[in-house]
Amino acid sequence: MKAVHGLSKRNKSPLRIIAIFLAVIILLLISMFLSISIGSIHISFGTIKQAILNFDGSKEQSIIQSVRLPRLLVTTFVGANLAVAGALMQALTRNPLASPGIFGINAGASAAMVFLTVLVPSVSMIGGVFGAFLGGAFAAVIVYVMSSLIKGGDSDVKLALTGVAIQGMLMSLTQTLLIFNESKTEGVMFWLTGSVIGRDWGHVHVLVPFSIAGLLIAFGLGRASSLLSLGDDVARGLGQRVFAIRAFTAVVVIVLAGVSVAIAGPIGFVGLVVPHMVRYLIGVDYRVVLPMSALLGASLLLLADVLSRFITYPYETPVGAVTALLGTPYFIYLARRKKTERKA
Amino acid sequence: MSYMQTVNKTKKQPSRFKSVGLFIILSVLIIALSVISLSLGDINIPPLDIITSFIGIGDPDLTSILVEFRLPRILLAILTGVGLAVSGVVVQSIMRNPLASPDTLGLSSGSGLAAVAVTILLPLASPSVLSAAAFAGGSLVFVIVYLLAYKKGVEPIRFALIGVAVSAFCSSGIHLLISKANPNVNAALIWLSGSLWGRTWDQLIGLLPWVVILVPLIWLLAARLDLIHLGDEVARGLGARVELIRLVLLASAVAMTAAVVSVVGTIGFVGLIIPHVAKRLVGPRHKKLIPIAALLGALFVLGADLIGRGIAPPIEIPAGLIIGIIGAPYFLYLLWRESKK
């Protein structure tokens, strides 16, 4: 908990923050290179450079242009969106277990997407995105209200358990809906685990505008998030309009997570784990935590995606399964650690 | 803690008359649902024809539909409900944790993961190997969850949260294995959410001995369960061999869950919810609780299967999904009630 609220913990020195920023940017560049280069056809650094400098339409270059590059962009922005959404939620709720996945936003957005594809098969991608916003918002409100009805005890853990139950119900509903539209089931099952396979420029054109707008607004909320993470009273005392900021932040979170789910499915654990790593590295000033989460979230999802191409080679594993396998142990660690600290 | 309060709260013990009456009502309901379930399907068979078929003077075609396809499915639903509900009663009492159940402890998903792994890696393995693997997987995951949740005692809600997280981990594993080996979505859905579709007598007979032997065994130990439920010291003071009985009961619960899961997949929520409903009806004494929970469990799974088949025929919705949609809200209600104590 201390690491989250961090009153007692000094922020790291500016020099260290700059050094870590540089390191993460280098990590991001390496991940991007790996993401372009590794796959069923290996592409060398030279070819990538050629494709950027003078595109000549060779086979490898068109793979880069039509397959790898859109996938790279989708993965990068989805990773950044989910990590920033997670960081905002953890600041807003002062709950280290908060994330778009735990709060049911991912599951709600997925249920809405599946609902739309079954009922209105002709729905456009943009229509799907707005459906995902609505579904995500709806699920988040339900989880929040339910968990605040459950009085007493450890509110963080209760929120998490409520979220898990709502998620379970939404997943059952989603799968039930799927049965009514079996022709689409195979693709959607893959999508439901969270996947970036086969994303094209059409997806990029929908994802990127929402993401850039959402991320920039989120970065602007850095100061307010730092204050909110100190507690409502402190924030109010320092002249923040707590309710307005909360509502606004919630909207930004839903846009970031909703558009990501609409494009790549419910990829879990990025939003939970990345903010913890960032706060560990550079402290609790959300003006730097938020951009840093974006960079690290993008790098990690890119790396998980590269890994997903190997696990069941030559088949590709949905990247959501990879993040779940890597993220669950960390979630358990967090749930355990909190107990020790409270007892101590 | 809260459990003791539960015991004290239910001061007035329902009369023996009431629980016997309840037992009869539930049995009649199960038979009624079974008959409805037998008669509904691609071909609707009126109840009268069902009776004539079973006494051997009916239309042979109808008889073979009934005996080969519909009857095993109904019996399987009943065994599944009984097995999961009784396992749920046992783990909740032993752990003195109202949020414990085969699924929140990770027993179901651990068994499921092991069963899927065996099915995919050793397609020729016999059903007994499958059951053994499911048992091993369920036990292993239970031990892992327990160790992870343990720190100077086990707090019910944290235990459930860690159990759910480990279950999610196992579900991802099931997903991975299935997407690698067999891109058949229906197979994946069955393992992940539980279904009674297309089961045969072979599978039913694999499950039958577990339930028929273990449920009476657990029922015989009902008085000991009452003692353990009161607390280790009380039980030990009254001369119960706590550790041994606990181990036997827990192993029975794991074995029964594993046997069910290796046949119908990971059906959740039955073992969590049914014991609470049963407790409200007949109080916390296990001698009454176990039979009533068994019947309620059978009724619940049978009903869910019937709803899943009846909503939009010929499409079948797996029973596990129906149970999930009904079960999750009830789970939240339990959490809310637990928090008020």
Image (tube, coloured by chain):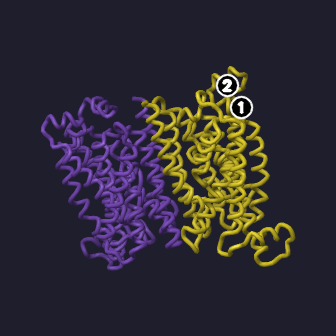
Q: Do labels 2 and 1 share a chain?
A: yes
Numbered tag placed on residue A120 in the rendering: none
Question: Which quadrant of the figure has residue A67?
Answer: bottom right
Q: Position of residue B74 (x, y in %)?
A: 34, 64
- Residue shown at 27%/40% (left/top)? B282
- Residue type, label 2: Ala
Q: Which residue is drawn at 30% across and 42% down?
A: B95
Q: Which chain is purple?
A: B
Q: In this view, does B259 lie above or below A344?
A: below
Q: Colour of chain A?
A: yellow
Relative depth, front residue between A73 and A169: A73
Pointer 2: what residue? A235
SS label for mark 1? helix
In the visual, does B152 lie left or right of A193? left
- Residue B195 placement: quadrant: bottom left
Q: Which residue is drawn at 72% across and 32% down?
A: A223
The disc placed on residue A224 is 1
Q: Which amino acid does label 1 sit on?
A: Ala
Nearest the camera: A212 or A286? A286
Structural crowding at the residue carrying mark 2, measured as other residues with C-alpha within 10 Å and reported as few (<14), some (14–19) or many (≥20) = some
Q: Given the image, what chain letter belongs to the residue carrying mark 2? A: A
Q: Is residue A178 left or right of residue A125?
A: left
Q: Which of the two labelled residues, at mark 2 and mark 1, occupies the earlier sequence position?
A: 1
C-alpha separation, residue under disc 2 versus residue under disc 1: 8 Å
Q: Do the residues labelled 2 and 1 touch (CB within 8 Å)?
A: yes
| Chain designation of label 1 | A
Res. B124 in view: yes
